[in-house]
Image (spheres, helix red, strand yellow):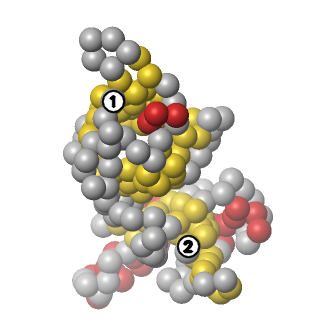
Amino acid sequence: MSTDEFNHFESYEWLGLFNYPDKSIDFPGKLTYTPDKGLQLEFMCQMDSNAKKVGHLHGVLSSGRLCTLVGNFDPPSYGMSIGSVSIYRGKPRFEYAIFGVHADPSEKFRGILMDFPNFQEFFHPQGFQDSAEYSNEPLHVHSGDGLEVSVITSGKFFPVFSDFANRFQSEDPEVLQEIEEFFADLAKRHPAGKISSRVEMKWLLEC
């Protein structure tokens, strides 16, 4: 399963080969996402009696990544071109995409993370995030209608191996020197205890 982060306010584009779940039909297409039009697949496929309505498609993107598009797909209802080779073509919308796997909409899985603009303001207003404690445990868990939703902490950390004083600022050089000596001694006494500097802190919904 993919762990990539996607922003609903940005646009994306992927080229790929797509097929019915039973592999009766396969065809090329361009998958796009835009904030105003959502997820769309621009496609063309040869007219075929197997081109029936289905509830999802499987695909392989040009990068080699698998994907599943969930939503009704009915080629004869979108449009056609009749000539030397007759084709169905169109640009239908899909409800959502799952990257990294060929799945069935009836399957259940866990691990969706959602980040909303200014979501952190519900927990720590701007200016107070740096003082928030990082926790590996969910801050809140709610269960209902067969779905469990958790609020979790997410952060980015960079390992610090030396130059500890550079992580702080002081007009007094003696203070910086003591900071450097303190962390250097700490690292020496606990060689297996890795020290990391937190550079980002936010809260996500997990379901």
Relative to 163, residue 7 above or below: above
Asked which secondary structure carries label 1, the reply is loop
Is any atom of residue 25 visible in this view? yes
Q: Residue at x 66, y 83 (%)?
A: 145
| Image spot of residue 168 (x, y percent) | 52, 61
Residue in the image at 30% along x and 28% along y? 46
- Type of the residue with mark 2: Glu
Residue drawn at 39 percent across, 65 percent down: 104
Q: Which residue is mark 1?
A: 47
Q: How far apart are the alpha carbons under marks 2 and 1? A: 42 Å
**Label 2 crowd bin: few (<14), some (14–19), many (20+), radius 10 Å:** some
Position of residue 187 relative to residue 10, above or below, is below
Q: Position of residue 22 (x, y in %)?
A: 27, 55
Task: Point out the tag, 2 or 1, that comes first from the N-terminus.
Answer: 1
Judging depth in this view, the residue of 86 and 143 nearest the camera is: 86
Q: Quadrant of the C terminus?
A: bottom right
Q: Quadrant of residue 52?
A: top left
Q: Is residue 65 visible?
A: no
Give percent across and percent down for residue 202. Answer: 60, 65
Q: Is residue 188 left or right of residue 42?
A: left
Q: Please, is residue 134 above or below residue 170 in the view? A: below
Q: Residue at x 36, y 63 (%)?
A: 103
Q: Nearer the viewer, residue 204 or 14?
A: 14
Which residue, as the protein is rendered here, is positioned at the far left?
64
Identify the amino acid type marked 1: Met
Q: Would residue 175 be found to the left or right of residue 98 on screen?
A: right
The residue singled out by tag 2 in the image is 206
